[in-house]
Each structure stands twice: as C-alpha cells, then as structure tokens.
Amino acid sequence: MHAVQFTEHGDVDVLSYDAFDDPTVGDDEVLVDVKAGALNHLDVWTRRGLPGVDLEMPHIPGSDAAGVVSEVGEDVTRFSEGDHVAVTAGRYCGTCEFCRDGQESLCVNYHLIGEHVRGVHAEQAAVPEENLVTVPDHVEWHTAAAASLVFQTAWRMLVTQADVGPGESVLVLGASGGVGHAAVQIADYAGAEVYATASTEAKLDHARECGADHVVNYEEVDFASEIRDRTDGRGVDVVVDHVGPATWESSQKALAKGGRIVTCGATTGAMAETNLNRVFWNQQQILGSTMATPGEIDDVLPLVWDGTFEVHVRDVLPMSEVQRAHAMLEDREGFGKVVVVPDSEHDA
Ligand SMILES: [Zn+2]
C-alpha cells in the first residue's frame, strides 16, 4: 500500500507518500480501507518531534480517518466487512483507576493513534475495534474523517469540563480552526451566548455561520477590553483558550467573576503567566481537557452525522500533496479542516 510517512523529524519536506508494508490485522483489530483522512495540529507537532515521544520509524502520521471495513480480526464483534467507520484516536488501558472510573482520557497509559503509534494517513490502516465508531452510510467521507478529534475535544471541554449551560456566555478564541469551529457550534447548542475571535473578516463571517452571536477581530482590538466593553464590564463565564501564552493573560481579563478557562492545547507554547490575584479574588477556575471518553464520543458524533453540527472542510488534497497540506495548517490561512485522501481515491 501507499502511506504518508517520515523517517526523521523536521519541516514539511520530511514527509512523503510512498510504498509501505501492508498492515497485518490483529485479533482485536479491523482493517480499514481509508477513504479520507483529516489533519490536526497534532500532526504538525508529531512531525516536528515531541519531547518524550520516541517514534518507531518510519512513522505514519494521522489521527483522523474514515473508510470501509475490509477485514476483521477473530475477536472483533461490533463490525463486519463493508461497514463505514471513523477512527477515534485515543488509546487507553481499560484497567487503571481512571479507566475503571469511566475517565478513559485520563488513563495513566493514554496515548494517541498517529502521535505515539503509527497513524492512519494511508491507503489502509489496522485499527483496534475500540478505536472505531460506526458512520451512517449517508455521511460524506470528508465529514466522517474530519469530525472525530475536534468535535470530541470541544465537547468534553464545553459540556463536561466547563459544564456550559443556557444563560451563560462563552468566548471561543481562534474560532476559525478545527477545535474552534466545533467549540462555537457546541457552545451555541448548549444554549450559551457565544463570542468568537478571529484574525480576518472572512474568518469572522465563518464564526457567525457556526453560531457566534458576537465576533471580535483580535488583530484590530484588544479582545479582553472589547469583551469587557460589550458585557458592561462583567466578562464572560467561560473562555475556550487553546492558544496559550499569547492569549492567557487576556483570557483571564475577559473572564467574569466565578468564570472558568478551559484549555485543550497551547499552540504558542507551554509556559504562560497566570495572575493568581484573579484566580482567588475572582474565584476563576482553570480547567484542562484532553480528547474525550467513549461515552462522550457516543454523545457528540451522532450530532455530526445527523447534521446538527457541521464540519467545515477548507480543502481536500491527495495524500501525495501532504507537504502542502501540513503547510496549510502551519500558515493558519483559511478556516476549517484540511482533508487528505489516498491518491487512488482522489482520482476516482
Ligand atoms: Zn487506563
């Protein structure tokens, strides 16, 4: 088969789409003929190299994909040949104290398909049964491939960790990205008044289409001051911050008393300064969130499949153009998800 791969960490030029040994299917695994994959910022970090993650080379990147089941291992019970499936990337042990408590994304051995082990940006992928969900036949491959990681992440952040409800206000930073556009839709669905930031008018229009009630161009104004102005000095109940040091101080300033910041990532770096006066006096809460539990995934993905939530696809490229696909994420132009498809499917 052909697979996206790299043999060393580095810039986009380490990526190629070349021949790779066909995957073998374990007893608990399902062989998926991949129809489409989707990129996440995680793919960029993994390609550049993450501290403490020692990959078996060559590495196949990719945490999101969808396709058709072509073979099942002996112990597989939930899937059979011909089923449409999508990958959910989180791997967990099932036996540690957190897994036993139903908190699989806190698993002491939590790791991700595509980040720590070989991923799914290939013509075929052997995926453990527990890392697949059924996709109804009417759902387009691009949607099926691009939904899983960002919608499960945004769902756990807003619904479980921040527990957003009607009457509350939510500010989503970077609303044009994958997680951002999912977060705007989920906050809107939860009944919140949604504020969104982005850097261009086109991206702000896109945030409005996703359900944002108010938009702020952070290139033109200080978003924290703007939020305080628009809320009569109160601030918002929840800030979704996946940016990090570039926005952290402003996120705290934009927050109402008793508000919570929820973070699932830090694209501008890991170290940020926290104003502790604001934490204790305003009783702010800082909430972390990673991926989601199988139960949360079962809650959110059907809302994508039935059209309640929409996956915005920015562009679809053949896997042979994976270097350009990665560059699109790094350049932060446009909005929505970048999808890659096996060249055989792209030409079909
Ligand atoms: Zn565990």
Image (cartoon, rainbow, N blue to C red):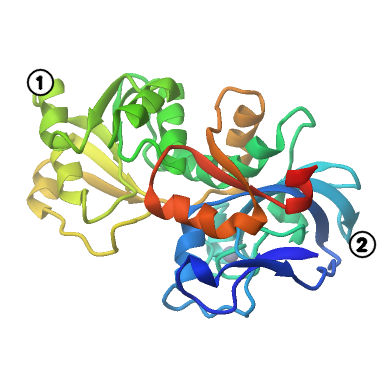
At horizontal 41% and vertical 55% (from top left) the residue drawn is 330
| CA distance separating discs 2 and 1 | 62 Å
Q: Is residue 186 above or below residue 126?
A: above
For the residue marked with disc 2, what is the amino acid? Glu
Residue 326 position, x and y percent, is 50, 56
Q: In this rendering, would 182 be left or right of 35? A: left
Residue 295 position, x and y percent, is 61, 43
Residue 26 position, x and y percent, is 84, 68
- Residue for badge 1: 232
Residue 75 position, x and y percent, is 88, 60
Q: Quadrant of residue 17?
A: bottom right
Quadrant showing the N terminus = bottom right
Q: Quadrant of ligand 1?
A: bottom right
Q: Label 1: how many residues lie within 10 Å, few (<14), some (14-19) or many (20+)?
A: few
Q: Quick check: can you spot residue 264?
A: no
Q: Label 2: how many residues lie within 10 Å, few (<14), some (14-19) or many (20+)?
A: few
For the residue marked with disc 1, what is the amino acid? Asp
- Residue for badge 2: 74
At horizontal 21% and vertical 52% (from top left) the residue drawn is 246
At horizontal 81% and vertical 52% (from top left) the residue drawn is 33
At mark 1, the secondary structure is loop
Q: Quick check: can you spot residue 286?
A: yes
Closer to the N terminus: mark 2 or mark 1? 2
